[in-house]
């Protein structure tokens, strides 16, 4: 599943993503359910792995929300 150019350390679990962005885990789940965030790839053990593109996207959504935009 891991490519030669991808380092596993570049991926975050949902809990680590929540801690890094300050976003609630339930909010991240909700954003996935309604399609604002795409479903992330999973590890062989079934854990969701959030790459830097998803981290940037969540930061964008959170900043947009802070500026008063609605979902």
Image (cartoon, rainbow, N blue to C red):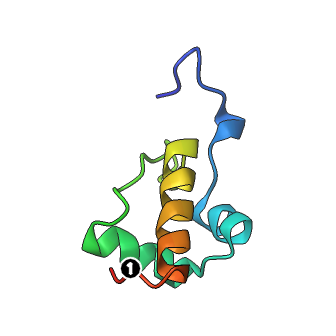
Nearest the viewer among 30 and 43 is 30
State the residue at coordinates (67%, 67%).
21
Q: Which residue is drawn at 62% across and 44% down?
A: 11
Which quadrant of the figure has residue 19? bottom right
Could you say which is closer to the camera, residue 32 or residue 57? 57
Residue closest to the eye, 20 or 40: 20
Q: In which quarter of the image is residue 5?
A: top right
Where does the image place residue 41, in percent across and percent down from the top left?
Answer: 42, 46
Q: Residue furthest top?
A: 4
Quarter of the rendering occupied by the C terminus: bottom left
Camera-nearest residue between 67 and 20: 67
Assess disc 1: are there few (<14), some (14-19) or many (≥20) residues with their C-alpha within 10 Å of its C-alpha: few
Q: Residue furthest front?
A: 67
| Residue at the spot 72% in from the left edge and 64% down from the top edge | 20
| Residue 61: image location, x then y, percent | 47, 68
Q: Residue at x 71, y 38 (%)?
A: 9
Residue underneath mark 1: 30
Asked if residue 65 is positioned above or below residue 32 in the image, the reply reads below
Residue closest to the far left: 34
Q: How many marks?
A: 1
Percent position (x, y) of residue 10?
66, 38
3 above or below 66? Answer: above
**Would residue 34 be found to the left or right of residue 32 on screen?**
left
| Helix, strand or loop for disc 1 | helix
């Amino acid at each position: 599943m891991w490519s030669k150019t991808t380092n596993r350390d570049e991926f975050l679990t949902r809990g680590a993503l929540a801690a890094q962005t300050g976003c609630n885990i339930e909010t991240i789940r909700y954003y996935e359910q309604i399609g604002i965030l795409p479903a992330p790839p999973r590890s062989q053990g079934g854990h969701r792995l959030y790459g830097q593109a998803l981290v940037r996207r969540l930061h964008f959504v959170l900043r947009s929300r802070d500026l008063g935009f609605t979902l």
